[in-house]
Image (cartoon, rainbow, N blue to C red):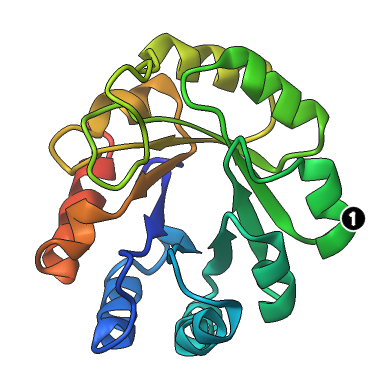
């Protein structure tokens, strides 16, 4: 296996049979999946906490970090392992004060080396570049700049902080990102839009050194 690991992002619908699907995915991805991002929109924190509880327990059982998207307040309420911040979700410094030293704090940096360096200086634990490929999950306008593979290479050669590649990534197109130095490949639709076990197994195969 390569050193690259899989970072799973939830679909927006995480009720119903989703906990069972997550259990299957993490079982199939033992050692490959090291983080799960809880990403829900347009619901209050009480409902979000109820939806998160079974998923958080599953992640804990599989030793997978449970990361909350966007909301430091929700991450604190859930005692989550960390939070993922967009550019409009506040600073890593403030999140660190709220969540403590142990929290994993990630920052979306789009295609910007400058944003990534600023995030690192502000204490981020990882930076995320993307979307590398067309994506239905990653929020971006039609004019959003697509990051270059060289950005991953540059980051991994200069900085100790891990980098995440995100956006439209599948088992078929992830190889260049791994080769460029991505520490984590973040995926959502490629896993949840079909058979999650088959998808995880396909990623495991794609992650094997050629």
Is residue 47 in sight in this rendering? yes
- Residue at x 54% of width, y 77% of height: 44
Left or right: 104 in relation to 29: right
Left or right: 138 in relation to 152: left
- Residue at x 64% of width, y 21% of height: 115
Count of residue discs: 1
In front here: 190 or 108? 108
Left or right: 79 in relation to 110: right
Q: Position of residue 61 (x, y in %)?
A: 51, 85
- Is disc 1 surrounded by few (<14), some (14 to 19) or many (20+) residues within 10 Å? few
In front here: 208 or 58? 58
Q: Position of residue 50 (x, y in %)?
A: 51, 89
Is residue 100 in sight in this rendering? no
161 vs 180: above or below: below
Furthest toward the right, the residue is 97
135 vs 179: above or below: below
In front here: 196 or 146? 146
Write down the residue under mark 1. 97
107 vs 64: above or below: above
Q: Position of residue 83 (x, y in %)?
A: 64, 57
- Residue at x 21% of width, y 31% of height: 134
> Where's the C terminus, which quadrant?
top left
Q: Position of residue 35 (x, y in %)?
A: 50, 60
Q: Secondary structure at mark 1?
A: helix
In front here: 160 or 143? 143
- Residue at x 65% of width, y 45% of height: 89
């Amino acid at each position: 296996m390569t050193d690259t690991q899989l970072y799973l992002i939830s679909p927006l619908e995480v009720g119903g049979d989703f906990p069972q699907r997550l259990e299957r995915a993490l079982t199939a991805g033992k050692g490959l999946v090291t983080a799960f991002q809880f990403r829900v929109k347009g619901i209050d924190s009480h409902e979000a906490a109820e939806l998160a509880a079974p998923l958080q327990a599953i992640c804990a059982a599989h030793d997978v970090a449970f990361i909350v998207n966007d909301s430091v307040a929700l991450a604190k309420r859930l005692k989550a392992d960390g939070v993922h911040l967009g550019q409009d979700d506040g600073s890593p410094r403030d999140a660190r004060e709220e969540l403590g030293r142990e929290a994993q704090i990630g920052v979306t940096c789009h295609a910007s080396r400058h944003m990534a360096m600023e995030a690192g200086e502000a204490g981020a634990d990882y930076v995320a570049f993307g979307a590398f490929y067309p994506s239905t999950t990653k929020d971006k306008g039609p004019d959003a700049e697509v990051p270059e593979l060289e950005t991953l290479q540059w980051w991994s050669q200069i900085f100790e902080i891990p980098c995440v590649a995100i956006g439209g990534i599948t088992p078929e197109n992830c190889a260049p990102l791994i080769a460029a130095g991505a520490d984590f490949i973040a995926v959502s639709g490629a896993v949840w839009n079909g058979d999650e076990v088959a998808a995880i197994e396909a990623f495991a195969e794609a992650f094997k050194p050629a």
